[in-house]
């Protein structure tokens, strides 16, 4: 009986430790969540969305991208599914079928290899936006890779990305707006803060990502979103109004 009790204790300890490991959280890194323009905030474990019901997609995905998450060992789950936190009329996993558009990630799966929870939550349909295949698998993928490299070399960056939803290039079945362009911005906080923005058309391109750099002020003008409102005004104005490629190695 004593032996059985000991094995039971060891089994329970193993199960508990496995669950604890699965739910390991990244350290608290501060909160620079943008202010929603036309959506409502949905907070998942490792990233936050601002979901627009009228466009049936999110206007932004925001998260802190750390080397631990990029260098994790979790494989893709590909479990596309309805986001249970969408308040009404959620997008189903099959909604893009036959449309000619990819289910394009806003928060990329490759950014969330920390554990199964982090990876799986990137496959909520609220994190998808219609992207042309040549864009999603081409220049957009190149930019995502650059952001991961920047996060590793800077020991973490804040990332905000999304479609520009003021205007559209069509409507898919179910009222899903097709964006004409997408934006992405990266922010490194600390004693020497820096910021950089990108706007890309929803189409394939052979150009360098440098050709798509813009000020964050320009992205705010195009989207109506107030990014990084938590910063002191003087710092925010300086960072958001300039484009400094050199500090990012571009």
Image (cartoon, rainbow, N blue to C red):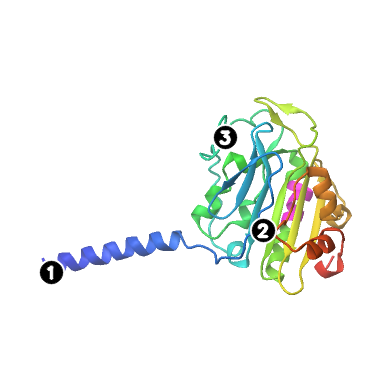
Q: Name the residue under label 3.
A: 93
Instruction: State which quadrant residue 113 falls in.
Output: bottom right
**Quadrant assignment for the C terminus:** bottom right
Left or right: 162 as drawn, with respect to 82 = right
C-alpha span from label 2 to label 3: 30 Å
Pair 2/3: label in front? 2
C-alpha span from label 1 to label 3: 51 Å
Q: Mark 1 points at which residue?
A: 2
Left or right: 132 as drawn, with respect to 127 = right
Residue 32 is marked as 2
Q: Residues within 10 Å of mark 3 (few under 14, many from 20)?
A: some
Q: What stretch is highlighted in magenta?
A: 137-144
Characterize the magenta stretch by its predominant secondary structure: helix
Sequence-first tag of 1 and 2: 1
Sequence-first tag of 1 and 3: 1
Please tell me which residue is depicted at 28% across the width and 62% down the height of the picture.
12
C-alpha span from label 1 to label 2: 54 Å
């Amino acid at each position: 009986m004593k032996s059985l009790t000991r094995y039971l204790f060891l089994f329970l300890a193993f199960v508990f430790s496995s669950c604890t490991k699965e739910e390991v959280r990244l350290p608290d890194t501060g909160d620079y969540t943008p202010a929603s323009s036309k959506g409502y905030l949905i907070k998942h474990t490792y990233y936050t969305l601002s979901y627009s019901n009228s466009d049936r997609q999110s206007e932004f995905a925001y998260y802190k991208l750390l080397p631990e998450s990029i260098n994790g060992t979790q494989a893709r789950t590909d479990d596309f599914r309805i986001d249970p936190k969408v308040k009404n009329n959620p997008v189903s996993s099959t909604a893009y079928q036959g449309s000619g558009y990819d289910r394009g990630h806003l928060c990329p799966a490759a950014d969330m290899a920390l554990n199964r929870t982090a990876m799986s939550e990137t496959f909520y349909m609220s994190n998808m936006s219609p992207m042309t295949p040549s864009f999603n698998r081409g220049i957009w993928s190149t930019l995502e890779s650059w952001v991961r490299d920047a996060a590793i070399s800077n020991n973490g960056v804040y990332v905000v990305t999304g479609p520009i939803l003021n205007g559209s290039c069509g409507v898919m079945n179910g009222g899903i707006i097709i964006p004409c362009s997408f934006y992405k911005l990266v922010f490194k906080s600390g004693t020497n803060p820096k910021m950089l923005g990108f706007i890309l058309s929803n189409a394939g391109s052979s150009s360098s990502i440098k050709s798509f750099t813009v000020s964050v002020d320009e992205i705010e003008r195009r989207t109506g979103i107030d990014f990084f409102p938590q910063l002191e005004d003087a710092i925010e104005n300086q960072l958001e109004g300039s484009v400094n490629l050199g500090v990012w190695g571009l």
